[in-house]
Image (cartoon, grey):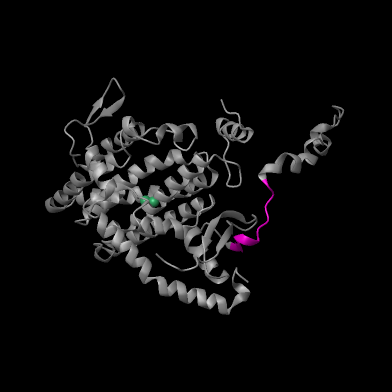
């Protein structure tokens, strides 16, 4: 079996068209950023799915933990007044 | 009764048709089962390039050649989407490829049959990709997010695969008598292996019940097989080709086609390594992997010399 060290993993983000943000589409292995971009083009945009690609080393991503998701997102859970539907407005006002 | 709070939460997510994501808690069995299934699916896409790749240099026109190259390249892409999904479960692609080379992970039985004539390429697109689509569409709703998302991409691309196969077979079937005969011969050889590739019958399928409870599988092998036959049987009439199954006929009462009993003994034999091309497929993959070693080494050496753009920096 091979003794090679596998090439690092990169996360791939694609802007599908101008005006939209980059979205995560998957990952791939490549020895460096340049190759990661070229591989991402071949793997994820064979049918014009993108106009711009970002590749990010998977190892540098910091993610929130699903285990603490309740406490982590808690601060937003009890603040309905952040939404416009929280407020009652007299009927006479047509648009607000 | 589930007592572990983690497991209760996991099952609740599945029962409410939500997706499990890589960093969520999951039972070991769920993780193992997915790694096995996704890896075997990935290997199938990659090994599946061989039977069709065999005809790229001999395609009868530039148009057919361009189409076939695009299709085979898609299959490479499918393999990569799937290895990527498997890796989110904590395995490395290199590990999975080693397991394939050691024969400890399998791939679909269908790719162990030879492509003897050009018509086989059309029959594969129509029947093999047709069976694959039947299997893959429900996987777009699989409970594991990365697998489901990979399947959405795959299914979008597969529809061209089946159509190009149908078109190519249709052209042959409506061509000269020799071409028609070649198309019929290809269908004779690919029909049963395609019906069998949807897996062993429900009575013998070892992983099915648990996979269903975990939302990995949505329909049983026999349900998928029926769906496949219902899809392709009327298409065969349009093609002007006759499936090699004397029992194939529409059943008004059931609202489905009846069909003969597939040779599951043959399926078992081919899956366990004794099909016409198993050794050739495995040897070819290993050789391609070994012959590419110097390219990977050169790319790694280049990356090491230019640390600014390498992830290891
Ligand atoms: Fe595929
Ligand atoms: Fe395909």
Q: Position of residue B47 (x, y in %)?
A: 34, 56
Q: Residue at x 57, y 47 (%)?
A: B22
Range covered by the magenta-colored residues:
A53-65
- Horizontal side of B141 relative to A20 (left or right) equals left
Q: Position of residue B110 (x, y in %)?
A: 28, 48
Residue A91 percent location from the top left of the image: 84, 27
| Residue drawn at (52%, 60%) of the image | A28
Query: Where does the image place residue A14, in percent across and percent down from the top left?
Result: 58, 58
Instruction: Please give the name of the residue rendered at 26% of the width and 36% of the height, measured from the top-left corner.
Output: B233
Residue B126 visible (yes or no): no
Foreground of the two, B8 or B260 = B8
Q: Is residue A3 visible?
A: yes
**Residue most extreme to the left:** B177
User: Which residue is painted at 43% across and 54% down in the image?
Assistant: B78
Asked if residue B42 is among those painted magenta in the image, a careful observer would answer no
Figure label count? 0
User: Seen from this angle, which residue lies furthest bottom?
Assistant: B305
Q: Is residue A48 left or right of residue B103?
A: right
Residue at the outermost top position:
B253
The quarter of the rendered structure image containing the C terminus of chain B is: bottom right
Q: Quadrant of the N terminus of chain B?
A: top right
Please tell me in which quadrant of the rendered image residue A10 appears: bottom right
Query: Is B300 or B192 nearer to us in this picture?
Result: B300
């Amino acid at each position: 079996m091979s003794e090679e060290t596998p090439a690092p993993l990169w996360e791939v983000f694609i802007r599908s068209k101008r005006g939209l943000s980059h979205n995560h589409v998957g990952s791939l292995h490549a020895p460096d950023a340049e190759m990661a971009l070229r591989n991402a083009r071949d793997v994820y945009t064979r049918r014009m799915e993108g106009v711009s690609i970002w590749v990010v080393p998977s190892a540098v991503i910091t993610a929130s933990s699903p285990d603490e998701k309740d406490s982590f997102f808690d601060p937003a859970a009890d603040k309905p007044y952040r939404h416009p539907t929280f407020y009652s407005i007299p009927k006479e006002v047509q648009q607000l | 009764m589930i007592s572990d709070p983690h497991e209760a939460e996991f099952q609740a997510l599945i029962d409410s048709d939500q997706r499990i994501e890589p960093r969520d808690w999951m039972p070991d069995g769920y993780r193992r089962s997915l790694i096995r299934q996704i890896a075997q699916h990935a290997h199938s896409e990659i090994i599946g390039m061989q039977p069709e790749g065999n005809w790229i240099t001999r395609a009868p026109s530039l148009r057919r050649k361009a189409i076939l190259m695009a299709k085979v390249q898609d299959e490479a892409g499918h393999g990569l989407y799937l290895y990527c999904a498997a890796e989110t479960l904590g395995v490395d692609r290199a590990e999975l490829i080693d397991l394939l080379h050691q024969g400890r992970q399998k791939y679909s039985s269908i790719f162990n049959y030879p492509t003897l004539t050009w018509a086989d390429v059309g029959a594969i697109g129509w029947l093999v990709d047709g069976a694959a689509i039947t299997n893959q569409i429900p996987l777009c709703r699989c409970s594991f997010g990365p697998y489901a998302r990979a399947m959405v991409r795959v299914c979008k691309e597969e529809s061209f695969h089946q159509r190009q196969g149908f078109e190519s077979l249709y052209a042959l079937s409506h061509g000269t008598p020799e071409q028609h005969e070649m198309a019929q011969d290809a269908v004779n050889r690919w029909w049963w292996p395609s019906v069998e590739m949807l897996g062993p019958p429900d009575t013998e399928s070892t992983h099915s019940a648990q996979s269903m409870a975990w939302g990995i599988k949505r329909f049983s092998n026999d349900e998928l097989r029926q769906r496949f036959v219902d899809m392709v049987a009327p298409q065969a009439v349009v093609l002007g080709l006759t499936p090699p199954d004397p029992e194939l006929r529409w059943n008004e009462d059931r609202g489905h086609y009846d069909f003969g009993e597939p040779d599951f003994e043959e399926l078992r034999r081919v899956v366990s390594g004794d099909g016409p091309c198993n050794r050739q497929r495995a040897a070819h993959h290993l050789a391609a992997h070994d012959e590419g070693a110097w390219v990977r080494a050169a790319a790694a050496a280049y990356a090491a010399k230019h640390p600014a753009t390498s992830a290891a920096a």
